[in-house]
Image (cartoon, rainbow, N blue to C red):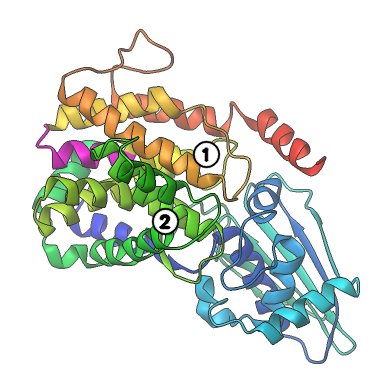
Amino acid sequence: MEKHKISAILERELVVALGCTEPVAIALAAATAKSHVNGEIERITVKASGNIIKNAKSVGIPGVSGKGLEFSAAIGAIAGNPDKKLELLAGITKDQEKLAFMLIEEGKVEASQADTPKRLYIEVFVQTKIDHARVVISDNHSNITLIEVNGKAIFHGGCENIGFNSADEELDALTIDELYEWVLQADLKDLALVKESIELNKVIGLEGLAGNYGLNVGKTIQENVKKGILSDDLATAAMSLAAAGSDARMAGSTLPVMANTGSGNQGIAVTLPVVAAAEKLKVTEEQMIRAVALSHLVTIHIKSKFGRLSALCGVTAAGMGASAAIVYLLGGSLSQLKAAIQNTIGNVSGMICDGAKAGCAMKVSTCSNVAVQSALLALNNQEIQSTDGFIHDDVEKSIAAFSTLGNEGTRHTDQWILKLMMEK
């Protein structure tokens, strides 16, 4: 692949997002629908795929106390600016929050599961006394495929089945070897977005360590290091900073993050373990930026096959990217980098996704720890062999097997996870 195409993939797949992308996508659909109608809202109806419901049900929304599909749609319709895409919920006021709660209390907002095979599907209908509008988002959190006003389609576009912002042929052409070579030779000016991801995501990591968010996973790890209960090593540094970023994001921090392939939590898990390791190892800023670029690209490569939403936790793919980057920081070879990815696949591939919530920070912590462990094993020339489990002797084949498990092997699991969540 031509080198500039890899740079373009980074530009398309790294996007600034405010808040967990599933409730934000619902808000975007509602805000878009509201922008096409006049008059006071009489009814909002939300239909969403099971994976959207999982991730929008319990996660915090930036700057407000409300949660869930109904609130996401209501606040989007009341306060969202659709022109801001995934940052549309910035600057919500208490008065706007109250209006959103009033719509729900008056029984004007309903949400249900959509009858669709798509894993990422959102349909929002907004009705007033004067007009009504329907907006559909599918396959990508900001990919609007339909805008319908008073029964007439005024926009029918987007990209059907687009799992990613990049073209399928570009993503299919990626290999670990090519990504590694590109990262070593890339001009730093082509990594400006990667540098921005480090800066943005570190701010929310430090906020999680300083504040009181969610389960305080990152902060608890750091406090126990200070007490001498946990050691002050590479693994705990990676775990605490990354988990703290997830703590803050999942609890509704108003700080934006750089998302990776549509997931802010994944963006945190891709960057912060690597940043913490780089700072611990006292490497140069350039080495840190190149390492984080490698982590981003390996994760994009894996997620392009794995998909945006699955019954399996996407942070596992971020752990695979981070493990490769940590090998790079520690001076390892390309073969050791591949071994680290293999080790991570063999370790955390069965971690399920039961929705976005405070507990995601624990999964981020686990995958950050595994990234360090996998890297250290690889540097000691220890690699899970192709005789074990579904690991192959080629890392690309192992990635393909992991992706098949996430896409095909867990469809029934996905249905049961949602059923168990909704029965509570």
Closer-to-camera residue (342/351): 351
Percent x, y for residue 202? 32, 61
* Secondary structure beneath label 1: loop
Residue 89 against residue 280 in the figure, above or below: below
Q: Can residue 397 be seen in this snapshot? A: yes
Which residue is painted at 50% across and 60% down in the image?
A: 212
Crowdedness near tag 1: few (<14), some (14–19) or many (≥20) residues, C-alpha within 10 Å: many
Pointer 2 residue: 245
Amino acid carrying mark 1 in the image: Cys
Closer-to-camera residue (34/228): 228
Magenta span includes 326? yes
Label 2 vs label 1: CA separation? 17 Å
Residue 405 against residue 138 in the figure, above or below: above
Q: Can residue 262 be seen in this snapshot? A: no
Dot label at residue 313 = 1
Magenta span includes 2? no
Quarter location, residue 368: top left
Quarter location, residue 328: top left
**Principal secondary structure, stretch drawn in magenta:** helix
Q: Which residues are magenta?
A: 321-332
User: Going by the image, does 389 lie left or right of 343?
Assistant: right
* Secondary structure beneath label 2: helix
Closer-to-camera residue (94/192): 94
Quarter location, residue 298: top left
State the quadrant of the C terminus: top right
Which residue is painted at 72% across and 60% down in the image?
A: 68
User: Going by the image, does 395 lie left or right of 317?
Assistant: left
Percent x, y for residue 263? 48, 55
User: Going by the image, does 76 lie left or right of 375?
Assistant: right
Which residue is painted at 39% across and 54% down in the image?
A: 268
Q: Earlier in the sequence, mark 2 or mark 1?
A: 2
Furthest toward the front, the residue is 227
